[in-house]
Amino acid sequence: MSSSAFNHYKYFLSKVYSWTLGDKADLFQKNAAWLMQNGITEGKLLDLGAGFGSHAIPAAELGLAVTAIDFSSELLNELKKFDPSSKVKTVESDFITFLRHHSENYDYVLCLGDTLTDLASLEMLNDLFQSLVDQVSENGRLHLSWRDYQTIPFMDSERFYIIKQDEKSIMTCVLEDENAKMITATDVLHTKIGNEFKVSGHSYQKLKLTPELVSDLLIKADFDVIKTKVQGRIVELVASKN
Ligand SMILES: C[S@@+](CC[C@H](N)C(=O)[O-])C[C@H]1O[C@@H](n2cnc3c(N)ncnc32)[C@H](O)[C@@H]1O
């Protein structure tokens, strides 16, 4: 049985998420380079679904004033460990709820790393963009990245892929087509203890989001889509205020 993204992170993924992304020093360095390439070097930045701070921490180190929102207390606690001088302001909240009760102007808003597809419905995505448009400054930008589970249908063998492995553990993701709007993703973790493998896993539903669908909702909310880059299933999109 699949559950909400909140429960998926709470009961399963938050415990292993940072392990799946490998060496943190390399990751922070790579993401600092990405921020600089995108001209994100000063001003106020809001990171939606910041996780353990893979973008928030390098952004704060570059000198941006960073607010990181996440509904996972476990991942925000990890972020705080990587940020001992508390450069990043953290907010433990669902970001849609946060944006409904919050009014601020940000130079940059990030929602990266397949977080958008964690939303429960297209209505919530629409709500997100409608609330965000007033919180992006005149010359500000919204940066999104996610996996498109719709445009390239997954054939049988592509339904299974390894997310991360090392000498003790292997994590696999299994994708299943659920309906016209959603897929089910199941993360399965095998860990070797002594001579035996222990297995655990958890499923949740994710939205099917094509670049066209996301662009239409952005335009409806009065954003301009200024860049879309597609590499396989990974979509990167940049929008500004119209
Ligand atoms: C796939 S991770 C991406 C983390 C980070 N952005 C990155 O690129 O490494 C998704 C993150 O978004 C958080 N998240 C998903 N939906 C959320 C929501 N509606 N409100 C707050 N946090 C959310 C999860 O807890 C998780 O930390």
Image (spheres, helix red, strand yellow):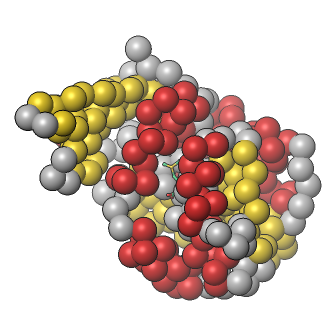
Q: Residue furthest top?
A: 1
Placement of 194 over or under 82, stated as above or below:
above
Is residue 100 toward the left or the right of residue 229 in the image? Answer: right
On-image quarter of the N terminus = top left
Which residue is drawn at the image coordinates 72% and 45% (left, top)? 92
Which residue is drawn at the image coordinates 70% and 73% (left, top)? 85
Viewer-proximal residue among 17 and 32: 17
Q: Position of residue 28 (x, y in %)?
A: 48, 74
Is residue 237 toward the left or the right of residue 140 in the image? Answer: left
On-image quarter of the C terminus = bottom right
Is residue 195 toward the left or the right of residue 94 in the image? Answer: left
Q: Residue furthest left?
A: 195
Q: Position of residue 227 (x, y in %)?
A: 55, 70
Which residue is drawn at the image coordinates 79% and 38% (left, top)? 97
Which residue is drawn at the image coordinates 48% and 49% (left, top)? 114
Viewer-proximal residue among 82 and 49: 82
Placement of 168 over or under 181, stated as above or below:
below
| Residue 131 appearing in the image | yes
Is residue 148 toward the left or the right of residue 101 in the image? Answer: left
